[in-house]
Image: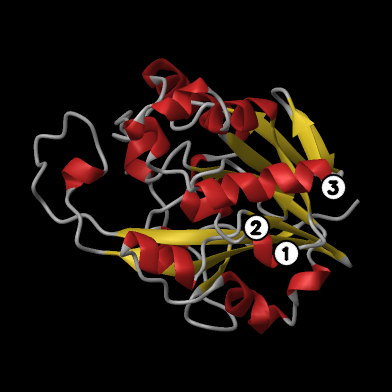
Amino acid sequence: MSDWQVHAIKYADRNARTRADSFLFDDNHDAPHAMDYFMWLLQRGEEIILVDTGYDEEEASARGRPIRLNPVEALAPFGITPDAITHIIVTHLHYDHAGGLHLFPNATLHMQAAEMAFATGPCMCHDTLRAPFTAGHVCEAVERLYSGKVQFYEGDAQISEGITVHCIGGHSRGLQAVRVRTQAGWMVLASDAAHYYENVFSNKPFPIVVDLQNMQDGFEILKRLASEPGLIIPGHDPLVRSFFPQVLTPFIHRLDVGPTGFSVP
């Protein structure tokens, strides 16, 4: 079978942050540290798989975190309408990754059973653990389940030929990374298993964490899954846009061609 095309679509950013927001135990904790927000599009011929959905204007207003594009607008340059999305890999159910599920009514969701159990279980009694989730997004996933449109996995699994998911945990109980065969080799969409290159390559945990050991073990899993270090794609790092070519619009970058000028931070 042929390889997959992979595009990163930036839909938001948040620049009023410091390194303390991105790394535990960082000596330069008060230095500025920007964050980008992405969703990812996988294509091969007529096959289309969306990885995460971003969030919409309503969620942006509720959290005071504006978006530059809603998920539907983000896909428009590809000529893709919401009804055409029939498969979504949900890396985890945090608001910035699952906040647009309701916009894609025809999609079957592919997720770890552990993530649904976490997002609907006793851990949500704790404000801190509940904070990155929005009840409406979780309820959308549950409603999709009751309509027969959720496929659960427990650990590693194949979604389609050339695409596998791998349960990492750490940041969220059922967080999964996505491994994709591309012309450049095996690429790993880390999502929040590594928000930044520095998380994974300098072994610096992200502060929002459920299981610190799983997060740090996950850094090594990402390295094993990728054909080379430059094919690990962090979930929120603005540097991604500097290593991969811009296409179609300023907020879309093509990943499957491989990085240019990448070196391990």
Q: Which mark is residue 147?
A: 3
Q: Position of residue 203 (x, y in %)?
A: 33, 28
Badge 1 local density, few (<14 within 10 Å), some, or many (20+)? some
Give whichever of discs 3 and 1 has the lower sequence position.
Answer: 1
Q: Residue at x 51, y 58 (%)?
A: 259
Give me the C-alpha separation between circle 3 and circle 1.
Answer: 14 Å
Indicate the secondary structure of the residue bearing disc 1: loop
Residue assigned mark 2:
101
Q: Residue at x 32, y 41 (%)?
A: 198
On the question of residue 68 being in view, the answer is yes
Name the amino acid type tagged 2: Leu
Residue assigned mark 1:
104
Q: Position of residue 85 (x, y in %)?
A: 78, 64
| Of residues 81 and 198, the one drawn nearer to the viewer in this rendering | 81
The colour scheme used here is: secondary structure
Name the amino acid type tagged 3: Ser
Badge 2 local density, few (<14 within 10 Å), some, or many (20+)? many
Indicate the secondary structure of the residue bearing disc 3: loop
Confirm or deny contact between disc 3 and disc 1 (CB under 8 A).
no
Give me the C-alpha separation between circle 2 and circle 3.
Answer: 14 Å
